[in-house]
Amino acid sequence: MPHIDQIVPALESFRIELPSWGFADTGTRFGVFRQPAAAATVDEKIADAGFVHALTGICPTVALHVQWDMPGGLTDLESVKRAASQAGVRPGSINPNFFQDQIYKHGSLSNVDPQVRRQAIVHGLESVAIARVLERRDEACWFGDGSNYPGTAHIRERRQWFEQGLRELHNELPPGGRLLVEYKPFEPAFYHTDIADWGMALLLARAAGQSAKVLVDTGHHYASQNIEQIVAWLLAEGMLGGFHFNDRRYADDDLTIGSIDPYQVFRIFHEIRFFERESGAPADVAFMIDQSHNLKGKIEAMIQTVVAAQALYARAALVDYEALVTAQRANDLVRAEMCLQNAFATDVRPLIAEWRISRNLPADPLDAFRESGYLDRITKERAGRARTPTAASLGTF
Ligand code: RM4
Ligand code: MN
Ligand code: MN
């Protein structure tokens, strides 16, 4: 059993951002199974996020989706700020929506129609303005742009339009602001996607300007791709901006962290900590969750994810780096591998419970949630009220 001091610094520094859309009804393209307690308004989403933070103590910010949470743009910000301060959280990354309006049928920043490209840029700039007013650092951009059939899109021309558009957004960032460029190999486009992988995102971020970085969504890779190697390369290039964490079995499944492959998340955390140790400075990387729980209870699933991420991060803090580097240099494969395996196999849950108690947090956030009566209360409050389903309820993205 390791000593608690070995993981306390990791526990003190680890923070992860909750997505507002993770508390709303979502489904697949085949349908949406509604939950009576699901949040339908931004106030409800923020309140639920605040409760997750109250129980876990490590998710003080909530990512906001401009179109779903602030359809009125800048005029909605006062109420968002009020809801956040009531819930004891702060707004987090600002997520523009470049994929849902009818005009984006053939793309946003890379649409052949200059008017559509302009409209996408105007929306992106509005999101930058929102980030400025809310004093948020990150604008997180995912683009569904792509095509379904060979020959139908001019791939190089679209790349140039992306460079220009991203540069324009980048140039309006507030001081200290960042533009995060997310990639995804396919879906909604099934032949080519304009920003399909980390290399494309990296080149476009570089072209946009020095405050543009790459956002790695763990669900946005082909099966068996080595994500931690991508992470290590982006760190070495100074280009890793942040993560959207979720787990997956097949494609962009948006499952709770660690539900399928906890070792994958551990290896990512390990590469980040290894880099930090060697560079002597914290990697400036935003940990964010991007999940939609279409069958599990929203809040429960979110707590489960936060707790799993925290435990995996704490386990990564147990890697014996000196032994690891020595073994690597000696080509001692088994000993090197065991440095990771031993840390990964350690049950840190009792130590984390101890840490939580020392911070006046419930030892087991999931139990505390079940005992809190919160779910019953919101189920009653929200039952039967009119719902205005947001786009998030149309499917997983
Ligand atoms: C995408 C991607 C984005 C998210 C949208 C809704 O697959 O993960 O981050 O904002 O879905
Ligand atoms: Mn994402
Ligand atoms: Mn996704």
Image: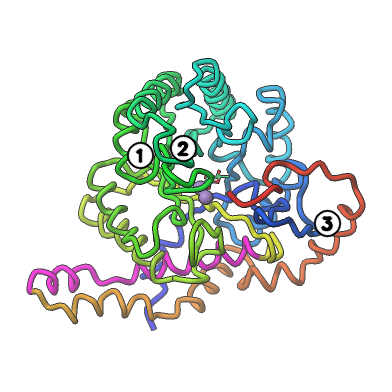
Neighbor class of circle 1 (other Cα within 10 Å; few <14, some 14-19, many 20+) is many
Res 210 seen here: yes
Residue 108: where, in percent of width, then height?
Answer: 51, 28
176, 10: nearer the viewer:
176
The residue depicted at 90 percent of the width and 58 percent of the height is: 380
The residue depicted at 52 percent of the width and 71 percent of the height is: 259
- Magenta portion: prevailing SS class: helix
Residue 229: where, in percent of width, then height?
Answer: 27, 57
Query: Of the residues shown, which amino acid type is indicated by label 3?
Result: Ile
As drawn, the residue found furthest toward the right would be 384
Query: Of the residues shown, which amino acid type is indicated by label 1?
Result: Ala
- Whether residue 209 appears in magenta in the rendering, the answer is no
Query: How far apart are the alpha carbons under marks 3 and 2?
Result: 40 Å
The residue depicted at 58 percent of the width and 45 percent of the height is: 61
Callout 1: SS = helix
Which segment did they paint magenta?
301-330
- Whether residue 307 appears in magenta in the rendering, the answer is yes
Query: How far apart are the alpha carbons under marks 1 and 2?
Result: 14 Å
As drawn, the residue found furthest toward the bottom would be 1
Question: Residue under circle 3?
Answer: 378
Q: Nearer the viewer, mark 3 or mark 2?
A: 2
Neighbor class of circle 2 (other Cα within 10 Å; few <14, some 14-19, many 20+) is many
Neighbor class of circle 3 (other Cα within 10 Å; few <14, some 14-19, many 20+) is some
As drawn, the residue found furthest toward the left would be 330
Q: Nearer the viewer, mark 1 or mark 2?
A: 2
Q: Nearer the viewer, mark 3 or mark 1?
A: 1
Question: Residue under circle 1?
Answer: 201
**Which quarter of the picture shows residue 3?**
bottom left
